Image (cartoon, rainbow, N blue to C red):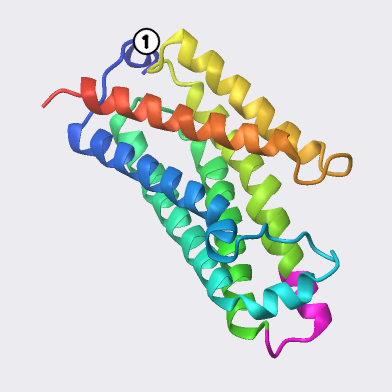
Amino acid sequence: MREQEQAFRPRLRGAAVTAFVCAVVLTLACVVEAGLAGWVTGERMPRPRADGAQEFLRAHDELLLGIGGLYLLAAGALLVFGLVVPRAVPSERRLGLAHLAAVAALTVAAGAGLALAFSGAMGSERAVQVLHATLTVVGGPVHVATLGLYVLALSRSAAYSPPERVIGVVAAVVAVMGLLALPVVPWGPVSTAGRILCLVWLLVTTNRLALRSPY
């Protein structure tokens, strides 16, 4: 088993290509979600408990519906990604928990966004605050940190080149630091940097898998 991991041997071309497509869908969903508020309303999504946050959310249920849908799409793409990657790359079974946590964070954020969209106008102020905080924190730093842990688990496979493995570790560290720094720098640039690094790592490595897989 260890000898098999010493060489780059993707097992199925179809699995490698599917993993790359899933990485593209995940990245596009995250990019569109990040800029959707500005495109739809011309404003940034207010932070929980900020002045005017309640009014903003109640007035833009279509925005919340879009955000929830994009998170759901991202969760589905990451779910399929984690199911096909072990078929494309020699890996151990340690990926399950990290994969599950990353998918769960996106799913919870999707649920919060959709719940806000469908009940924001009728929900109590407290319920709206809780859902808004869940959407912002779980869909932001928590999602990025769990994605970073998943990238860290993936990068330990010898199927990846040494530079790819090092960059994967760096991306994971930055992603987790975004969550640890949350009390000090809420929703700061650290999580954004971690998210970008993790998504780029997934795109680059799965693209290499797809190109070098045997047919």
The amino acid type, in three-letter code, at marker 1 is Gln
Secondary structure at numbered mark 1: loop
Over which residues does the magenta segment extend? 121-131
Q: Is residue 104 visible?
A: no
Q: Quadrant of residue 81?
A: top left
The residue that appears at 41% across and 43% down in the rendered structure is 82
Query: Total label count?
Result: 1
Q: Nearer the viewer, residue 207 or 161?
A: 207
Q: Is residue 29 magenta?
A: no
Q: Name the chief secondary structure element in magenta.
A: helix
Percent from the top left, x then y, of residue 211? 22, 23
Q: Nearer the viewer, residue 59 or 96?
A: 59
The residue that appears at 29% across and 31% down in the rendered structure is 88
Percent from the top left, x then y, of residue 55? 75, 77
Q: Is residue 130 magenta?
A: yes
Percent from the top left, x then y, of residue 107? 55, 61
- Give the side of residue 137 with respect to residue 77, left or right: right
- Give the side of residue 108 with respect to residue 132, left or right: left
The quadrant of the picture occupied by the N terminus is top left
Residue under pointer 1: 6
Tell me if residue 31 comes above or below residue 214 in the rendering: below
